[in-house]
Amino acid sequence: MDNIAGRKPALGWAVNISVILIVLLWIFPTVGLLVSSFRTADQISSSGWWKAFFPTEQTEQFRTADPDGRVQDGDVFVVEGVIFENAEANIASWGTSSRDVSAYAPGETADLGDGETLTLNEDGTYRWTGNDEQISGRGQRFFVTATQPPEFTLRNYDNMLFGGSSDNISKAFFNTLTVTIPATIIPILFAAFAAYALAWMDFPGRTLLIAFIVALLVVPLQLALIPLLKLHLSIGIGKGYLGVWLAHTGFGLPLAVYLLRNYMAGLPRDIIENARVDGATDFQIFIKIILPLSFPALASFAIFQFLWTWNDLLVAIVFLVDSSGDTTVMTRHIVELLGTRGGNWEILATAAFVSMAVPLLVFFFMQRYLVRGLLAGSVK
């Protein structure tokens, strides 16, 4: 009786837990990049992104103001100032040596020897006193351990999108759009016509042609990169947008034709036959009936093709990127940042999330068609 249709499987809870774990496994890195992109370099180096929403205790090094601004108070010279001018922080402890950064509590006075003293108050104000020889040269160094409130900034995005430095990713962003949009539309146009012909038009060798297209799905694209590049160079295409569009079209066509053909073959035959009886041509049937009904499959392939071309690095390097840097795509730009800014995690996190933002929007906008398009043709 356990196998009666409609009864929930006994291990359904295990499946649900597994799905939740997989979802969390994918969400955590994305959320981590998003949060880190709004943090400063000091915050990233001192604590994990999961602590960004809570006050954190940090130890920082400070120096008093320049002794040139000292004032004389009786027999001693005094330098006064304040730290944390633009931020609220609760000072827990402080010290004058890196070996003991928590030697004093706020408000206590440190004896630096020979009458030289330094006092740091809880509100961040300090007072450095000493004789003429002691209050000279550089400011006195001291260390402060304080609890900092959560702080987020848009400076990283401003530098990456609107800054004038080499880190600016806006040009690479538009270069990637220039590659991705045509490389997504062109295969769909060709594949839709081919899929209709393979699904609803009788001609010799149709079955053999379908089998050939299925065989192309298992051919690694790496095998075709160098021969295809030599072909592009021999016919004058060279490296450029046209070459990378044709490459992505060729690599994406087998999956597109296979996916669309399975979907179109599952459409009701009565609709097609009635249209032919009414005198509709194959082109009219394709434009007015097949295409509107095949939108889930078209959207499903568009998601795959867009994500693949947006995140592609190998094909872009072979067919597009040159020494000028004018056609650099985002994946290539991020690789260059890894070499030049490998320690600047705030820059890398911002660039990575900018690169992820568009695919995420595309997927969430069209994901309702994804399952329908993939399952089409699998059952009768």
Image (cartoon, rainbow, N blue to C red):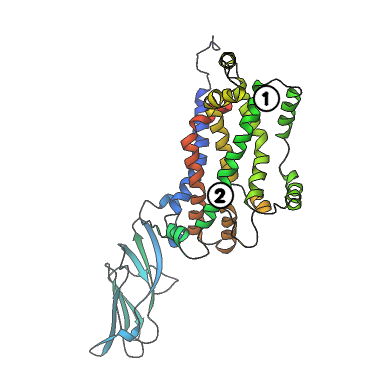
Is 275 placed left or right of 123 in the picture?
Answer: right
Element marked by disc 1: helix
Quick one: which residue is furthest to the front in this view?
279
349 or 226: nearer the eye? Answer: 226
The mark nearer the N terminus, 2 or 1, is 2
Q: Mark 2 = which residue?
A: 178
Element marked by disc 2: helix
- Badge 2: residue crowd in 10 Å (few <14, some 14–19, many ≥20): some
Residue at horizontal 76%, vertical 52%? Answer: 234
Q: Give the CA distance from mark 2 to mark 1.
A: 31 Å
Q: Is residue 159 above or below residue 271?
A: below
Q: Mark 1 = which residue?
A: 198
The image position of residue 107, as x and y in percent, is 27, 70
Q: How many marks?
A: 2
Q: Is residue 48 above or below residue 358?
A: below
Residue at horizontal 48%, vertical 30%? Answer: 368
Amino acid on which disc 1 is placed: Leu
